[in-house]
Image (tube, rainbow, N blue to C red):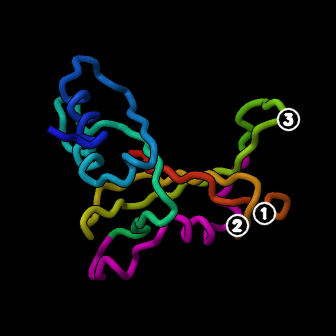
């Protein structure tokens, strides 16, 4: 029987006798709402903590839903990154590379995931910017950065 990578991963995870502190995954898994729902659902020890990459067009809510339709507050991650104020960004030197230090600008925003046009649990959106493109709201010396990764973390 054919299974997607996410279905295979969830099967292995559910049968494992090892408790995972964190699960990390690439964008293929970050696009799979069913995969994320299973991780967020109750297990004996509670929801599984995860960090998954998501595409720039992944939508999130930045406000808790109260008396508004979901589409009024939904934001694509890439657009949200462009609108963050300068104060939201922290520049972090990750390591020394072959051509000098490897440095990224990071921001984190508390958001609600979107699953089937309904609010998912509140999550952290971690946004990574690297050299190359253009991003608004960054300190002047870091202008010209581009979105290089966005991640959902619970």
Residue placed at 70% from the left, 66% from the top? Answer: 135
Magenta-highlighted residues: 65-91
Q: Position of residue 154 (x, y in %)?
A: 38, 45
**Among all residues in the image, which is located at the extreme top?**
17
Q: Position of residue 34 (x, y in %)?
A: 24, 51
Instruction: Locate residue 87, reporting x and y percent.
Output: 69, 61
Contact between labelled residues 3 and 1, with CB atoms less than 8 Å apart: no
Q: Is residue 146 magenta?
A: no
SS for dot 2:
loop
Q: Are marks 3 and 2 in contact (CB under 8 Å)?
A: no
Which circle's residue, 1 or 3, is located before the other in the chain? 3
Q: Tell me the residue at 27%/70% (across/down).
A: 117
Q: Gap in Å between the C-alphas at discs 1 and 2?
A: 6 Å
**Residue 56 sits above or below residue 28 on the image:** below
Is residue 68 shown left or right of residue 86? left
**Residue situated in front as seen by the camera: 52 or 68:** 52
Task: Please report the residue visible at 41 percent of the width from the left and 67 percent of the height from the top.
Answer: 59
Residue closer to the observer: 67 or 154 = 154
At horizontal 71% and vertical 64% (from top left) the residue drawn is 86
Identify the residue under disc 2: 135
Label 2 near label 1: C-beta < 8 Å?
yes
Asked if the magenta segment contains residue 88, the reply would be yes
Residue 144 — which label? 1
Of the two numbered discs 1 and 2 on the same chain, state the one appearing first in sequence: 2
Q: Quadrant of the N terminus?
A: top left
Q: Secondary structure at mark 1?
A: loop
- Snapshot quadrant of residue 139: bottom right
Extreme-front residue of the structure? 1
Reading the image, the residue beneath label 3 is 100
The residues bearing labels 3 and 2 have C-alpha atoms spaced at a distance of: 23 Å
């Amino acid at each position: 029987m054919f299974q997607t990578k996410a279905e295979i991963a969830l099967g292995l995870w559910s049968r494992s006798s090892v408790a995972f502190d964190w699960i990390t995954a690439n964008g293929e898994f970050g696009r799979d709402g069913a995969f994320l729902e299973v991780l967020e659902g109750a297990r004996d020890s509670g929801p599984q903590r995860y960090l998954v990459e998501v595409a720039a067009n992944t939508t999130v809510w930045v406000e808790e839903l109260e008396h508004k339709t979901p589409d009024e507050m939904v934001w694509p991650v890439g657009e949200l990154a462009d609108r963050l104020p300068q104060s939201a960004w922290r520049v972090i030197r990750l390591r020394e590379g072959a051509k000098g230090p490897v440095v990224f600008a990071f921001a984190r925003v508390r958001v609600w995931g979107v699953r089937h046009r309904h609010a998912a649990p509140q999550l952290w959106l971690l946004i990574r910017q690297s050299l190359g493109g253009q991003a608004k709201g960054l300190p002047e010396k870091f202008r010209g950065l581009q979105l290089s990764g966005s991640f959902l973390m619970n």
